[in-house]
Image: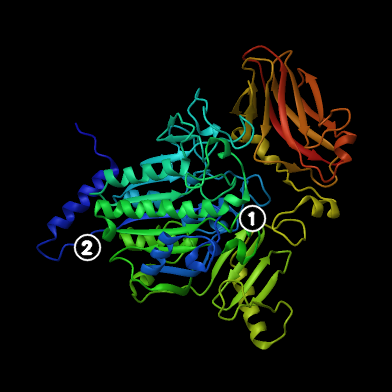
Amino acid sequence: MTHVSRRDFLRVSSGSLAALSLSAVAAPAKRPNFIVLMADDLGAQELGCYGNQTHQTPNLDRMAAGGLKFETFYACPICHPSRFQIMTGQYGHHNGVYNFGSRRGGPTAGDNIAAARTFGHILQDAGYATALAGKWQLSGRLPDLIHEAGFDEYCMWAYQNNLPEGVKHTGGWEGKPGSKTSRYWYPSTMTNGTYRPPKPDDYGPDIFADFAIDFMTRHKDDPFFVYFPMALTHSPYYTTPDNTKGPKDHFKNLRENWRANVEYADKIVGRLLSALERLGLSEDTIVMFTGDNGTGHNGKARPTELGARVPMVVYGKGRVKATGSTLELADLSDVLPTLCDLSGAPVPDDRPIDGTSFAPLLDGRPGKRREWIYSYIADRRILRDKRWLWEDNSPLHRGRFYDCGTSRDGTGYREVTDSEEPEVVAARQRFEGLIKTLPVPVLDYEGPAAEMNSKTAKRLGRSMGKPWDARKANQAKLWVPAFDSPIVSAAPKGVRFAVKKGKVRGVAMAPGRFALPKGATHVRLEVAEVSPGLKWMFKLAGTKTTKAGNRAAHTTTLGKTGVLEIPLSKLVLSQPTETWQVKFGIASGKPGDSVVLSVLEFITK
């Protein structure tokens, strides 16, 4: 019996239904293909079509002139929440992601994108062939990595933890060997779970573009969707194939290469447009180009419009009216409902969708227009309508209010934070009502930036880490192994750490580092089970090294069950601004020996 995939079944079914209805109505127009490109760390101001006089971006300029360019389009100021938002059509208070997992306000229950309903799932279910090319960075493990998020195929920049078991990267590194695999020269790439051994002159962005073009070629007779989160233009700023002088300068991180990186991103866009022409697909394909946050060295991670404003250029011969530019507002949450609108796929009705389709703008149809757009990072929010802008607002921080007039690029904005002019007061009150519907985490410090830096932490006498959550200790999946570690698994009474083999056996609590609860003096451990003679250790690892070499407060015990209350060391108590990683280790024992930890919490005595 021949296997038919769900997507192929839907494609056949849709075609059959269309054929059966020909006698009654005209055949429906062919559904468009989609290419959604998202540059990494690229603010709108970097492109020629947005007024940049230095960077040459002819392909994107041509798309803007022959399609639609949003003058004001928002992402989040940092990439992780942006990648969730574009794929789910949801803001952070609905998808749970406001920041990186290891940073302030980051997700505490993991960031499993596969558990969401992505635009990949939606278009896949609608009969589209789906593919991802470029930078993934999100959750997932082999063999289901990326496939489980709604993509039939993928070609990705692979971190070390993405590679198949037993496979080692044989190419370049961004930093010391063994640190971060290269995304540019001599790159670490993987296609559908298989590592591609690189050559020294291989350039990652070209590999991803080659894959996307091959996928389009193989599916030129099908409706297809290519999601292309690009590696460019994120640092390090290495040379590109257009300005390299040879292998010796491939790994020199120089700001002077920034222009070349922007222009090569434009060249990749040009390659895709040329491929569509060659395949006869230009009139059947809609191409969107946007960014994940502001420019890396000019806006990124700041809760301002400069951090949030990214390009959005939409192009498609015969599919997108050559409007040039629009003053209508949109943000990344609008991409999913727009793809649904254009493809005829239903918008999910089992969860809130924050975005609004901008499909009517593409061909001049009447339709709903957004009155405001929104961005966020951790506890800080940015809210804008066509005239007014509120930056850097949090539940504990008022932020700044601006009258932008008709300007869209930051020029001529007038700060009116404390103004009592009637129209300012009315606008501010309206925004205050809106912001109440857009909750963010309440984080316990008052400061001028979305990320607490070390200077602010020192001034306030607080840690940059997020508060310790004792519930994490009972989640086996949040203990991350290192070296030849214990086997970690859930047990009826807690978390079991079982001896495997080797001399170094330790696991660490993830994600990220934590701040000790204010006033904590002891750690309280409850041991439900322990093998006779097993020697184990609890440890707090800080970021600093003392003269004595100590980085931790720890205890070791033999074969005891029950409650242990361990006093925190003077080293820990003397560092209120330090961040800590909670570790648990087994110092000795034979394979199969185990200890079950049921409670791990910090207390005051």
In the shown orientation, is residue 589 left or right of residue 17? right
- Image point (58%, 47%), residue name: 237
Callout 2 crowding tier (Cα within 10 Å): few <14, some 14–19, many ≥20: few
- Badge nearest the viewer, 2 or 1: 1
Q: CA distance from mark 2 to mark 1?
A: 45 Å
Against 458, residue 579 (above or below) is above
- Image point (67%, 88%), residue name: 422
The percent coordinates of residue 363 (x first, y second) are 33, 71
Q: Quadrant of residue 324?
A: bottom left
In this rendered view, identify the residue nearer to me: 395 or 34. 34
In this rendered view, identify the residue nearer to me: 293 or 590. 293
The percent coordinates of residue 356 (x first, y second) are 44, 67
In the shown orientation, is residue 443 left or right of residue 81? right
Residue contact at pointers 2 and 1, CB within 8 angstroms: no
Residue farthest to the bottom?
422
In the rendered structure, find residue 297 and report the number of the disc placed on it. Answer: 1
In the rendered structure, find residue 487 and report the number of the disc placed on it. Answer: none
Can residue 405 be seen in the rendering of this structure? Answer: yes
Against 599, residue 209 (above or below) is below
- Image point (66%, 11%), residue name: 590
Give the quadrant of the C terminus: top right
- Label 2, on which residue? 29
